[in-house]
Every structure is written in C-alpha cells, then in structure tokens.
Image (cartoon, helix red, strand yellow):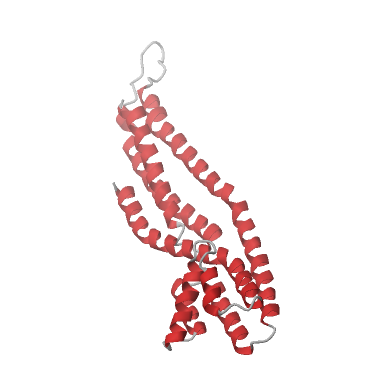
Amino acid sequence: MLAVLIATELLLIAIPRYRVWKINTDVDTELPSVIRVIRDGLRAGLTLNEITGLVRRVGKGRVGEILSRAVAAQMSGESTIKDYVLKEAERIGNENLASLAIILDTVLRRGTREVEVLDMAYRSFDSYLSYTYERNASLKPYVALIYVIMILYVVLASIIAYFLLPQIARMSLSTVSGVPAPTVSITTIPTQLFATLLGLSIIIQSLIAGAIIGRVTYGKASVGMLHASILMIVLTAVNYILYLTLYLH
C-alpha cells in the first residue's frame, strides 16, 4: 500500500512535467523544418501570414501555432513577434524556441540576407538536434535493461525470502548419537521482516532508477519519476504475486 501511494503521488507530479517535455520535444523536432519553410517562403516572396499558414502544417503544428499567434499579436499591437515567442519559450522552458525568436527578429529587422541567415540557422539546428536524437536513441536499450535487472532482482529476492528461508526453517538438524536434535522453528527466521525490507528496497531503488533515467534520457530527473512510478507498481505487483504463490500458498 505504501508503494502504491508513493507511485500515485509520483504520477501526479511526473505526468504534467512529462507533457511539458513532450511539447518541447515536438517543438525541437519541428524547428529545422519550420526554419526551412520560412526561408523558402521569404525567397518566394510570400507574406508573413502566408508563411505561418504553411508552418502550421509542419509536424504537429506546435511551432506554427505559436508563430501564428505571435503574428496576430504583432498586427494587433499587443506584442512583437520576438517578445511573444520569447514568452512562450520561457513558459515551456525551451531555449531553442527562444533562439528562433531572436533569429526571426534579426531577419525581419534587417530585411537583407535573410535567406543566408535562415539557411545557417537551419543547418545549425538540424545538426544539433540530429546529434541529440541519435544519443537518446542509443540510450533507450539501457532503459529497458534497468527494467529487466530490477525485475530479476525482485524475483530472486522473493524466491529467497518466501521460499528458501521457510524451507530452511522447516529442516531438522542432523541427529547426534541417534538422538534427534530439536527442529528449527519457522518463527526463528523473520520472513515478514525480509518482506518489509524488500518492499522498502523496491521503493528506494525505483526512485533512484527513475532519477537516473530522467536525467540521462530526458535531461531532467523529475521527468524520470514517471518511470519510477511505473517501476514501483510493476515490482510491487511482482513481489506480491510471488509472496502469495511461494509463501502463503
């Protein structure tokens, strides 16, 4: 019950942060294509409104939606494109989107060599994001490995605590000179204590594993608490099933 309560609390914390991370990932994925569309649109002589209409079709349209609202805010006099995009970048914590705001402001203010500036920005973003995604893809098998190792740990620890220890407790000591020695009582081996310690170790190790996964894969340990919650629930379920099967059956 303690593990389930902690896992539920972690889910309430981790899910909103995972959604923000997902939004940032979508934005980063779209940025190179968005810059390319803006570059080609300016080269073709399209207006900013027409370009934002095309940008909204890129990926899930997250960057396009932000740029559309930024253009509308500038036309109504509420804010400039740069300020609006910077505010959105600060809201979701995306430095790449903030860089796009500065690039667009530079291009629109100067009005010259905009194609060259955007072309350079496209190559920079594309190279950086390609490296980031390749690195994250190479780390995914290690995330699965953490799950496998922890499940194996719980299975082996449960077999020892719920099966081997009670079996040892039931064994009689060898007789001496034909006189049988006293039988070891099952109460001399604290199975329930082992069960409690195993449950606590599941909680602690799940938290550590989740923080490591979050820091390495997502860049934020707090996002990894989603994995910590999943690990806690899965491992606790495995532990409980083995407890019922091996000890109480």
Q: Position of residue 211 (x, y in %)?
A: 48, 58
Q: Report the front residue among 4 and 49.
A: 49
For the point 56% across and 72% down, which residue is it?
Answer: 96
Q: Quadrant of residue 223?
A: bottom left
Q: Is residue 105 above or below residue 15?
A: below
Q: Report the front residue among 233 and 58.
A: 58
Q: Report the front residue among 119 and 131.
A: 119
Q: Quadrant of residue 182?
A: top left
Would residue 113 be found to the left or right of residue 142 on screen? right
Q: Position of residue 175 (x, y in %)?
A: 40, 15
Q: Position of residue 62 (x, y in %)?
A: 48, 67
Q: Quadrant of residue 103?
A: bottom right
Report whether residue 241 is seen.
yes
Q: Is residue 174 above or below residue 68?
A: above
* Residue at the extreme front: 45
Quadrant assignment for the C terminus: top left
Tally the numbered discs: 0
Would residue 193 be found to the left or right of residue 36 on screen? left
For the point 35% across and 28% down, which residue is it?
Answer: 245
Report whether residue 190 is seen.
no
Q: Position of residue 152 (x, y in %)?
A: 49, 38
For the point 46% across and 85% down, which residue is it?
Answer: 74
* Residue at the extreme top: 178
Q: Report the front residue among 122 and 194.
A: 122
For the point 37% across and 42% down, which residue is it?
Answer: 236
